[in-house]
Amino acid sequence: MLPTRKLTLIAVLVAQAIVLHLFESLIPLPIPIPGVKLGLANIVTLLALVIFDFKTALLITVLRTVLGGLLSGTLFNIAFFMSISGAVAATTLMAILMSLTSTLNPSSRFSLLGISVAGAAAHNLGQLAMAALLIKHSAIFYYLPIMLVSSLPTGLLTGLLLSKLLEYLRASGQLDEFMS
């Protein structure tokens, strides 16, 4: 991919992730559990891992988190640090699982749904680790089971939405175009 074209696609993905991040804050969850969100912006992160590489996906993740924090008024507060730690943890684990998937034999590959759920769990772990660091107490990890249980539906949702997006991109020929 030409550098200008790649840069343009990165900018579009960052913008889409920010829109999803801001849109998600407007959606009331049926069961309001503190710290639990749908994670719609992770669709873009996982898409970036499919199209690009870890470094580019991490760049998109960090830009999305910083710009999203700036636009939502949470830049450099506790919520921002928890968000960025969770996002980096999720991106890192999903990248590791994606790389294992491409090197393992086909019968033992991780599915996009599995990678998405693992990313949601890593996001929650990253958030709790940052919270423990900020409050200087490990009791916050008693909340871990609730956060991990919430990773299943949220990770499945983002994984399913990404799968549908990839189906559309393949059918329209755009996925091959992005990956060339």
Image (cartoon, rainbow, N blue to C red):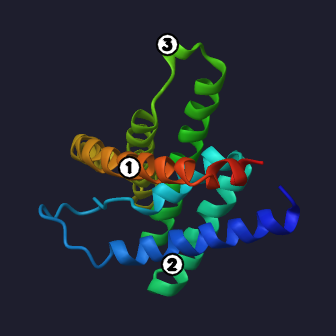
Mark 2 secondary-structure assignment: helix
CA neighbours of label 3 inside 10 A, class few (<14), some (14 to 19), many (20+): few
Position of residue 55 in the picture relative to residue 158 (left or right):
right
Instruction: Tell me which amino acid carries mark 3.
Output: Ser
Q: What label sits on residue 124 in the rendered view? A: 1
- Label 1: how many residues lie within 10 Å, few (<14), some (14-19) or many (20+)? many
Q: Position of residue 64 (x, y in %)?
A: 57, 70
Give the mark nearest the N terminus, 1 or 2: 2
- As drawn, is 94 to the left or to the right of 113? right
Of marks 3 and 2, the one in the foreground: 3
Q: Nearer the viewer, residue 31 or 110?
A: 110
Residue that badge 2 annotates: 69
- For marks 3 and 2, the one nearer the N-term is 2
Q: Amino acid at mark 2?
A: Gly
Q: Amino acid at mark 1?
A: Asn
Separation of residues labelled 1 and 2 (CA atoms): 18 Å
Q: Is residue 29 above or below residue 76?
A: above
Kindly identify the residue that appears in the image at 66 percent across and 20 percent down. 103
Which sits earlier in the primary sequence, circle 1 or circle 3? Answer: 3
**Disc 3 to disc 2, C-alpha distance:** 41 Å
The image shows residue 113 at horizontal and vertical percentages of 39, 38
- Horizontal side of 176 relative to 141 (left or right) equals right
Badge number at residue 107: 3
Q: Answer yes or no: do the residues labelled 1 and 2 have beta carbons within 8 Å?
A: no
